[in-house]
Amino acid sequence: MQTGKLIIAIVNKGNSDLVMDAARLAGATGGTILNAYGTTNEENSKFFGVPYFPEKDIVLIIVNNKISDDVLSKIYNVAGLKSKATGFIFSIDINNILGININNEKNN
Amino acid sequence: MKKNNNFEKICILTVIVSQNHANYFINRIINEIDVNYCYTLSGRGSAANAIHRALDIDNHKSIIMFLIKESLIKKANKIIEDRFSISKYAKGISFIIKIDSMIGYILYNFLINQKKIKYIKKENKK
């Protein structure tokens, strides 16, 4: 039974390539990208009286436990809160991984 | 009488496949296994579009999340593995996320497909 980490990076739309390039440098192989909208206080999110909600890309990357910290820090360095991507990045534990062999990642 | 408090744990079974293969998993897992609820998100693969066109791979993905009892994971994984092994076009990724806690007894019974609440009769002590 394979166990690993699911890294979730929520960045501004159009910055998913930044996230994936950084993750690949650290040894990840690929990911899945979802489209989403951020939620915010309606009063603060008006542009000339017209409400808008920031568009986001959510990037999901599966990595093994050995390289997860490295991947997280590399993604944060290029796409973190202080970058143009204003990314929010975290990981959760996953198990019973099928369809991908995460123990053959580049760094290993 | 007292309520049966032997709760079964629930987890999230996530399957990421090409968009045109999603219905197969939804139909099989819901019909053959005790799963009452799933939801589907749309996404795309991270490789460049040019690579997808060159390799003739569909870039559009469906992310299906099933709420499933832990005891049924093996059965679900068997269905998923058999499907993934058919061809390269049917390949995908699946994994499990564990749930620590949840709120809502009726919701819980719905998710584990508990058709009625079980009660255990206490024996009268003389």
Image: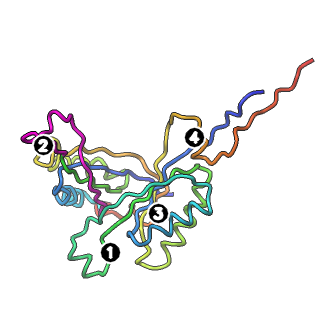
Depth check, mark 1 against mark 4: the one in front is: 4
Q: Which residue is mark 1?
A: B58
Depth check, mark 3 against mark 2: the one in front is: 2
Q: Quadrant of the N terminus of chain B?
A: top right
Determine the residue positioned at 10% across, 39% down: A49
Quarter of the rendering containing residue B53: bottom left
Local secondary structure at mark 3: strand
Dot 3 and dot 1 residues touching (CB under 8 Å) = no
Q: Residue furthest left?
A: A48
Question: Which amino acid lies under the numbered mark 1 shown in the image of this protein?
Answer: Asp
Q: Is residue A37 magenta?
A: yes
**Chain ID, mark 1:** B
- Other residues around mark 2 within 10 Å, as few (<14) / some (14–19) / many (≥20): few
Q: CA distance from mark 2 to mark 1?
A: 37 Å
Dot 2 and dot 1 residues touching (CB under 8 Å) = no
Above-or-below relation of B75 to A70: below
Depth check, mark 4 against mark 2: the one in front is: 2
Q: Is residue B126 rendered to the left or right of residue A51?
A: right
Q: Which residue is mark 4?
A: B108
Q: Is residue B77 magenta?
A: no
Q: Indicate the position of residue A41 as horizontal and vertical percent values.
A: 21, 34
Depth check, mark 2 against mark 1: the one in front is: 2
**Chain ID, mark 3:** A
Q: Which residues are magenta?
A: A29-53
Depth check, mark 4 against mark 3: the one in front is: 4
Question: Which amino acid lies under the numbered mark 4 shown in the image of this protein?
Answer: Tyr
Q: CA distance from mark 1 to mark 4?
A: 36 Å
Q: Quadrant of the C terminus of chain B?
A: top right
- Of residue A70 and residue A93, the one placed in the foreground of this image is A93
